[in-house]
Image (tube, coloured by chain):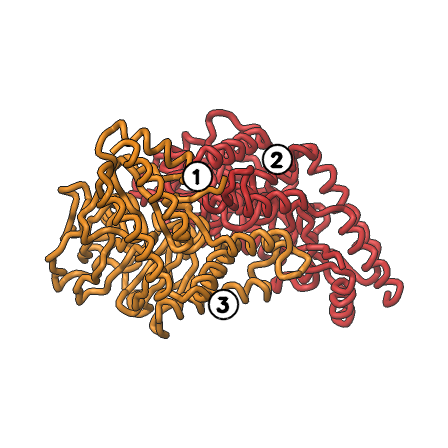
Chain colours: A red, B orange
Amino acid sequence: MKKHNFSPGPAILPASVLEEAAQAVSDFNGMGLSLLEISHRSAAFTAVMEEAVASVNELLDLDDDYSVLFLSGGASSQFFMTAMNLLNEGETACYADTGTWASKAIKEAKLFGTIEVIASSKDKNYSYIPRGWKVPAYAKYLHITTNNTIFGTQYHWLPESDAPIVADMSSDIFSRPIDGKNFGLIYAGAQKNLGPSGVTLVVVKKDLLGKVNRVLPSMLNYQTHIAENSLYNTPPVFPIYVSMLTMRWIKANGGLEGMEVINRRKAQLLYDEIDANPCFEGATVKEDRSLMNVTFLAKTPEWEAAFASAAKDAGCVEIKGHRSVGGFRASIYNAMPIESVQVLVDVMRDFAQKNG
Amino acid sequence: MKKHNFSPGPAILPASVLEEAAQAVSDFNGMGLSLLEISHRSAAFTAVMEEAVASVNELLDLDDDYSVLFLSGGASSQFFMTAMNLLNEGETACYADTGTWASKAIKEAKLFGTIEVIASSKDKNYSYIPRGWKVPAYAKYLHITTNNTIFGTQYHWLPESDAPIVADMSSDIFSRPIDGKNFGLIYAGAQKNLGPSGVTLVVVKKDLLGKVNRVLPSMLNYQTHIAENSLYNTPPVFPIYVSMLTMRWIKANGGLEGMEVINRRKAQLLYDEIDANPCFEGATVKEDRSLMNVTFLAKTPEWEAAFASAAKDAGCVEIKGHRSVGGFRASIYNAMPIESVQVLVDVMRDFAQKNG
């Protein structure tokens, strides 16, 4: 039976990307060698890295003020590296607390300067994106989490800020057009919309760097990686390659504009069913609903258990909600075909007819 | 034409491992999903991680005093993480400087305490392993690099030390039997003998941890990863899987004893030819020759250029020496078949007959 993979991450990747990636593990570009066993300084991998960087520049409409890096350590390492590289002791950075990952970013940043949480939706279990907040003039930067994977909320607007915006886009990077030049730093663990786990995209405006007093280990200094084009040490070759293939797929499928059109269509299909279906309700306020992670609750505990089983029987896997929210979460990243969303919607409709 | 891959890293992996890895990218364990798109908390990946950890415990003969971690960031991140986690300001750690990577470890460790270089072979371009040094009683730990990938030297003895030994084994881990319990901490970037790039093995004696005063970001604290069994954040799933397969292959091929037997045979075949051949000479002292990275020089610049070309014509790739040494370097890790070494030896013999 075909599986419909609603995993929040590591998550679904385009079938054609997986096919090419498998081929590269066997024999890369007809070289007679696996991609896994060639030097990261070989011409073949240099071409991969160059295409990956060029694709990010193109998709985010960046200019020469920015550097594109492929690092390891996940977004969890960026939680502290951003503050470590951008904030001196005694300086203040502002954070919006919109969920678990934002809270972790706040916790780690506090080791390196003063962190002011200027907006939070913790009061209602992160079911909305706070509005009406101002970034004070003394802020060194503003940190936001553009999409909250666990809670299913997403910014559909860009906060006004004179300070550079540092954005964790792990779960919605490349899902819609953005102008990268509106940000001081963007980071994203690859394993949702970009590639497999094991690589982290960092886009940074170069003039923000080199201004902290502390001594940084080489590997924790963005400038090290900029100077060496992400090849200061052996990079995660395979995850970078798969990310490059995924960006090639995005560009061949309408670019970010194309992704947004289909992502809106998929999300609307599912949210419309949630709103119409007597057995379910959405887990967030409507205006902040995520196009990537659709969270919803069954109206009775019996229905929750029964629907989990019905979805599984239809091949819909990984739809259990995070324990912080409960219920269900359908992650419908770029690579998720609308046909799979339709299967889930059909199961919900069928469930309501039998139980609702 | 068949390629004989002498790359220093990322490096050759067993053909059967590459085949299984390619299959897992297409469809993992018949799940109908790629390994790249399943949750790191799924039962399927949990089994992979558990087997990987169990294999390390078995191969290194560890006991419950040790934890086995699969981290990201490469050995380059361990250069500073070891000191950051083990050494307080004002305390002293001792280092043996046996090459480029040892020097980098020294440089990064200096950010966190007093580093005393108690042995060095820098005077002769790292062509030998220094002997006759003593570790002072005040040393918090001794750091060594067991195999020097660039220069082609290797420790064939274990330094006497009352202080715990911290060892960078990136390029000779699992190439010969060792008792892991002789070490306080072992680290190894995977991309030589263990797997593809993108994951780093760390083995640490737990009672050495938790003794530094500095505040550590969560991701840089070994105790974070120990508490979460390397799943504090999303780990590099695919590199860990391939490493697990490689260890399975090692165990099915005689374990570390079996690896050593064949590694010695391969190295002897090549070193014997270097010593007998009128066109070449070894680049290191004989008693410290590496079983993993065989460095040798052509006796004239003309021969160097001509032999590079002859080797390439025979399908022997990536044998150019590092610029710090020049000449040639044949990396003959675990997965390199003796038949490929024989091909290189045959090219050398043939070359001498024509030119010597």
Residue B163 occupies quadrant: bottom left
Percent of width and height locating residue B188: 36, 55
Q: Which residue is mark 2?
A: A248
Identify the residue at image location x=53%, y=30%: A54
- Secondary structure, mark 2, is helix
Q: Which of the pair B306/B92 is nearer the observer?
A: B306
Q: Which residue is mark 1?
A: B315
- Secondary structure, mark 3, is helix
* B280 lies above or below A150: above
Res. B104 visible in picture: no
The alpha-carbon separation of the residues under discs 1 and 2 comes to 32 Å
Mark toward the viewer: 3 or 1: 1
As drawn, the label of residue B50 is: 3
**Residue type for callout 2:** Arg
Identify the residue at image location x=51%, y=45%: A34
Res. B9 visible in picture: yes
